[in-house]
């Protein structure tokens, strides 16, 4: 079974109180598939046992009809905030229908009261997940510089810092302000023409994030659905290293997402990155290609290349995953002027620097491939 088949089946199941299907109300969450066995969480407005029994029966019947041999359901309650957002959304939809009826059936395009729903089936946004097998290979550096390079090409770009335990995108881009919140709608911070949202905006400086998997999944879904992104061509997701809960949640929320793998030339880094690539292939995500970061150090005086971390890791990984090595990014420091300058960022390369040009070439390749 696929996530699409499950969602299609759940569109036939109506929530007893609100009289809308579970998918439209975003009440079917944390979908996991293990062969013919399906697990998911159904969100409820209240702990009403009769409603719960009805939902359990209807959801189980719908999924078994769609091909699931075994269905395992968990039930959870919507928070007060989520209930308020849902009630406001339904109220506005009802108002629009009344207006449409009065205007002869012409119904305007609708927008979620809580923000732009990037998970909507009608969204034309291209999602690119940047992942790696292990930390320390420069995955976040590749994320922010690819996003900025795409923006320099005239694209509308958003970045979601999905590395919730190890968020670093705001610091790397030199972002000091926080998102604006207006009437429960979050507006992302814009920097270098890129709209950014990160867990780092919502915790105290250097405070640890001690959350379990389901809470992380909820935060990610909030990033997709409760932020006013506006119109976007690309969303770049900076995933945590490895193949843990967050990476799995992203793969399931975004079956259409494409994958960009980052490694260093070292054989071990490439070997570990292959696991992340295998996960993408297993979940039927297209692997756009491989970026080999810290590929070499080029002497500024003589132009000699020193392969400090070895050679061939990126090529080997690309060959193993039957994809292309899109870029080899050399080691190099960012020279963006004075740290007290408002335009300073510690990790974004200027467009006219050698490494900045490499990222422009990478952005152009990515645009062609998608």
Image (cartoon, grey):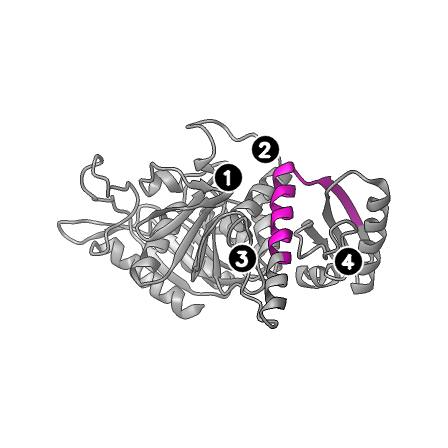
**Cα–Cα span, label 3 and label 2:** 31 Å
Q: Residue under circle 4?
A: 13
Mark 3 Cα within 10 Å, few/some/many (few <14, many 20+)?
few
The reply, left or right, for residue 201 in relation to residue 5 is left
Q: Is residue 165 left or right of residue 214?
A: left
- Magenta span: 72-94
Query: Can you identify the residue that label 2 sits on?
Result: 211
Packing grade of label 4 (10 A; few <14, some 14-19, many >=20) is some
Along the viewing direction, whichever of 281 and 197 lies nearer the viewer: 197
Magenta-span inclusion, residue 324: no
Q: CA distance from mark 1 to mark 2?
A: 9 Å
Q: Earlier along the polypeptide chain: callout 4 or callout 3?
A: 4
> What is the distance, in whole Å, between disc 4 and disc 2 at their CAs?
31 Å
Q: Which of disc 2 and disc 4 is earlier in sequence?
A: 4
The residues bearing labels 4 and 3 have C-alpha atoms spaced at a distance of 23 Å
Mark number for residue 223?
A: none
Instruction: Describe the element under mark 2 as helix, strand or loop.
Output: loop
Is the Cβ of the residue at disc 4 closer than 8 Å to that at disc 2?
Answer: no
Asked whether disc 1 touches disc 2, contact meaning CB atoms under 8 Å apart, the reply is: yes
Which numbered mark, 1 or 4, is in the foreground of this view? 4
SS for callout 1: loop
Q: Earlier in the sequence, mark 1 or mark 4?
A: 4
State the residue position of label 1: 164
Q: Is residue 278 above or below residue 268?
A: below
Q: Secondary structure at mark 3?
A: loop
Q: Position of residue 51 (x, y in %)?
A: 83, 46
- Which of the marked residues, 3 or 1, is nearer the chain's N terminus? 3
Residue visible at 79% across and 48% down? Answer: 72
Query: Label 3, on which residue?
Result: 111
The kind of secondary structure the magenta stretch mainly shows is: helix
Q: Which residue is at the front of the view, 248 or 313?
A: 248
């Amino acid at each position: 079974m696929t996530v699409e088949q499950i969602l299609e089946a759940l569109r036939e199941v109506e929530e007893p109180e609100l009289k809308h299907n579970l998918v439209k109300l975003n009440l079917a969450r944390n979908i996991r598939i293990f062969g013919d066995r399906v697990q998911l969480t159904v969100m409820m407005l209240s702990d009403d046992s009769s409603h719960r029994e009805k939902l359990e029966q209807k959801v189980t019947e719908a999924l078994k009809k769609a091909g699931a041999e075994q269905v395992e359901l968990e039930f959870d309650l919507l928070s007060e905030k989520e209930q308020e957002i849902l009630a406001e959304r339904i109220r506005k939809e009802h108002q629009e229908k009344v207006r449409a009826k009065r205007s002869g059936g012409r119904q305007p395009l609708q927008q979620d009261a809580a923000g732009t729903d990037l998970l909507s089936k009608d969204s034309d946004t291209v999602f690119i997940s940047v992942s790696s097998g292990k930390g320390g290979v420069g995955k976040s550096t590749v994320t922010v510089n690819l996003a900025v390079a795409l923006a320099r090409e005239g694209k509308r770009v958003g970045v979601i810092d999905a590395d919730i335990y190890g968020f670093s995108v705001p610091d790397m881009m030199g972002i000091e302000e926080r998102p604006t919140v207006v009437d429960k709608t979050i507006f992302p911070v814009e920097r270098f023409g890129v709209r950014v949202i990160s867990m780092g905006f919502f915790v105290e400086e250097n405070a640890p994030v001690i959350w379990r998997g389901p809470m992380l999944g909820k935060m990610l879904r909030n990033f997709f659905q409760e932020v006013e992104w506006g119109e976007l061509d690309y969303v770049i997701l900076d995933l945590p290293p490895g193949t843990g809960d967050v990476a799995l949640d992203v793969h399931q929320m975004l079956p259409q997402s494409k994958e960009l793998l980052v490694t260093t030339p070292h054989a071990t880094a490439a070997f570990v990155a292959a696991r992340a690539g295998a996960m993408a292939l297993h979940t039927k995500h297209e692997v756009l290609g491989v970026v080999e970061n810290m590929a070499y150090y080029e002497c500024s005086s003589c132009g000699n290349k020193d392969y400090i971390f070895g050679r061939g890791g990126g090529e080997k990984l690309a060959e193993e995953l039957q994809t292309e090595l899109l870029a080899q990014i050399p080691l190099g420091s960012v020279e963006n002027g004075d740290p007290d300058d408002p335009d300073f960022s510690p990790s974004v390369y200027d467009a006219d620097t050698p490494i900045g040009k490499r990222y422009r070439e990478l952005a152009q390749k990515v645009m062609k491939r998608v």
